Image (cartoon, rainbow, N blue to C red):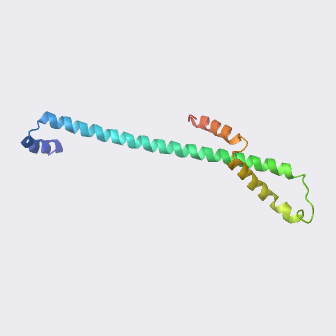
């Protein structure tokens, strides 16, 4: 016995007709379909937002790496005085210093490279800005 026939057996006691029951059943099915569509749309939007966040993070990471290489080249010719710098320690940690400085510059807004890279990556993925 189907649900509709079960409902139509009991509902006439309350004054509802079979047509009313069918209309109500269709409305319930339509609402369920709409809810499923909304859930799928929300999941799709969340997935796209995650892709956009990953693209933004990748663009910032690239800008930071680019800035680090630039700063390493820039500091290559700089010599510091012996009591406060120089030696093997400075040579070892100069790359760490330039990495940290480049990350801070990027975090503060960078040189605008991340925005351009992000825009191009979004185009390549078929996403709008």
**The image quarter in which residue 95 lies:** bottom right
Indicate whether 68 appears above or below 121.
Answer: below
User: How far across and how far down the image is residue 119, in percent?
Assistant: 63, 36
User: How far across and how far down the image is residue 71, in percent?
Assistant: 81, 49
Indicate whether 116 appears above or below 100.
Answer: above
User: How far across and how far down the image is residue 117, in percent?
Assistant: 67, 39
Query: Does residue 1 appear left or right of residue 86 in this picture?
Result: left
Residue 113 vs residue 37, the one in the foreground: 113
Query: Does residue 45 appear left or right of residue 103 in this picture?
Result: left
Identified at 66% across, 44% down, the residue is 59
Indicate whether 125 appears above or below 99.
Answer: above
Identified at 85% across, 60% down, the residue is 91
Residue 106 vs residue 63, the one in the foreground: 106
Q: Quadrant of the C terminus?
A: top right
Query: Does residue 67 appear left or right of residue 116 in this picture?
Result: right
Identified at 77% across, 50% down, the residue is 68
């Amino acid at each position: 016995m189907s649900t509709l026939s079960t409902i139509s057996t009991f509902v006439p006691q309350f004054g509802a007709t079979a047509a009313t029951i069918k209309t109500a059943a269709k409305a319930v099915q339509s609402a369920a379909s709409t809810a499923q569509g909304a859930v799928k749309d929300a999941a799709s939007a969340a997935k796209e937002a995650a892709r956009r966040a990953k693209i933004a993070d990748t663009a910032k990471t690239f800008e930071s790496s680019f800035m680090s290489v630039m700063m390493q080249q820039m500091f290559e010719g700089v010599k510091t005085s012996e009591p406060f710098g120089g030696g093997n320690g400075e040579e070892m940690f100069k790359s760490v210093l330039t990495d940290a400085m480049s990350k801070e510059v990027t975090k503060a807004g960078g040189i605008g490279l991340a925005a351009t890279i992000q825009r191009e990556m979004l185009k390549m993925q078929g996403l709008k800005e």
